[in-house]
Amino acid sequence: MTAPHLDTVLLDLDGTLVDSADGILGSLRAALAERGLPEPAAGLGRELLGPPMYVTLPPLFGADEAAAIVGVYRRIYAESGWLRSTPYEGIDAMLRELVARGLRIAVATSKQEAAARLIVEKQGWAGLIEDVCGDTPDAARPTKESVIGEALSRLGSTHAVMVGDRRYDVAGAHRNGLGCIGAGWGYAEPGELIDAGASAVCATPADLVRHLGLPPVSLD
């Protein structure tokens, strides 16, 4: 879907707008330490970035212990982890160009919605991003499909595209009848996004603007 048929761009947060790996994995390490647990033998890798912790941790620690870890992780992340999120190069310009071209932009993330809003506000994007949709404390939106569905409902959009860096973004978009463009600068493994069915993978935020048929504009 290109510019003449597009009114909304949904953007993932972690691995798409911001590099938040240090804050997420650092908070998880701190939570494990507080619980007196060692890291998994394979370590804490990028495969944990994307889906909710209550999905990724049970296979590693068991359901009961995972629930306890998630509770500690959320407290630590809310205290300091969310502050360790750095915008990728070119994101500010990309957001401003999309808005300048008349598109609505919104965040659709599996992160807790409250934390996602804090990150968006801290980066100064609240005036550019129309809405931030994420998971709830009681896991009412446990999949990317449910997050994207809620975002579309809030926005009333029928002409949208998803942009994300993991296969979960692609699957969630497709289940809502949307195409998905891969953010190649994020956390995906080589080939992950194309194998999942992304319509394209863009190497940089500027490439994404060009792919949408939106050449960079001067915002001076």
Image: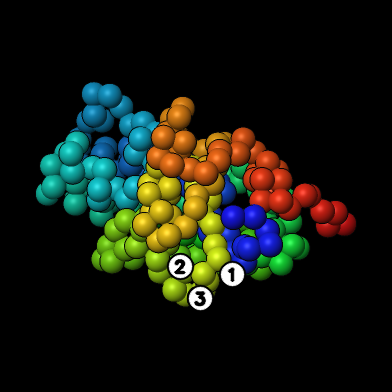
- Quarter of the picture containing the N terminus is bottom right
Front residue (pair 62, 71): 62
| Type of amino acid at the residue the image marks with label 1 | Glu
Q: Check disc 3 and report the residue beneath it.
A: 156
Identify which residue is drawn at 64% across, 38% down: 204
Q: Check disc 1 and report the residue beneath it.
A: 130
| Type of amino acid at the residue the image marks with label 3 | Gly
Q: Check disc 2 and report the residue beneath it.
A: 151
Say if 151 sits above or below 81 in the image. Answer: below
- Tell me if 170 is positioned left or right of 128 in this view: left
Image marks 3 and 2: residues in contact by CB distance under 8 Å? no
The part of the image, by quadrant, that contains residue 193 is top left
Identify which residue is drawn at 40% across, 66% down: 149
Mark sitting earlier along the chain (1/2): 1
- Tell me if 16 is positioned left or right of 128 in this view: left
| Type of amino acid at the residue the image marks with label 2 | Ala
- Tell me if 162 is positioned left or right of 69 in this view: right
User: Could you tell me if residue 119 is visible in this image?
Assistant: no
For label 1, the SS is loop
Category of crowding for the residue at label 1, using alpha-carbon neighbours closer than 10 angstroms: few (below 14), some (14–19), many (at least 20): some
Say if 68 sits above or below 154 in the image. Answer: above
Category of crowding for the residue at label 3, using alpha-carbon neighbours closer than 10 angstroms: few (below 14), some (14–19), many (at least 20): few
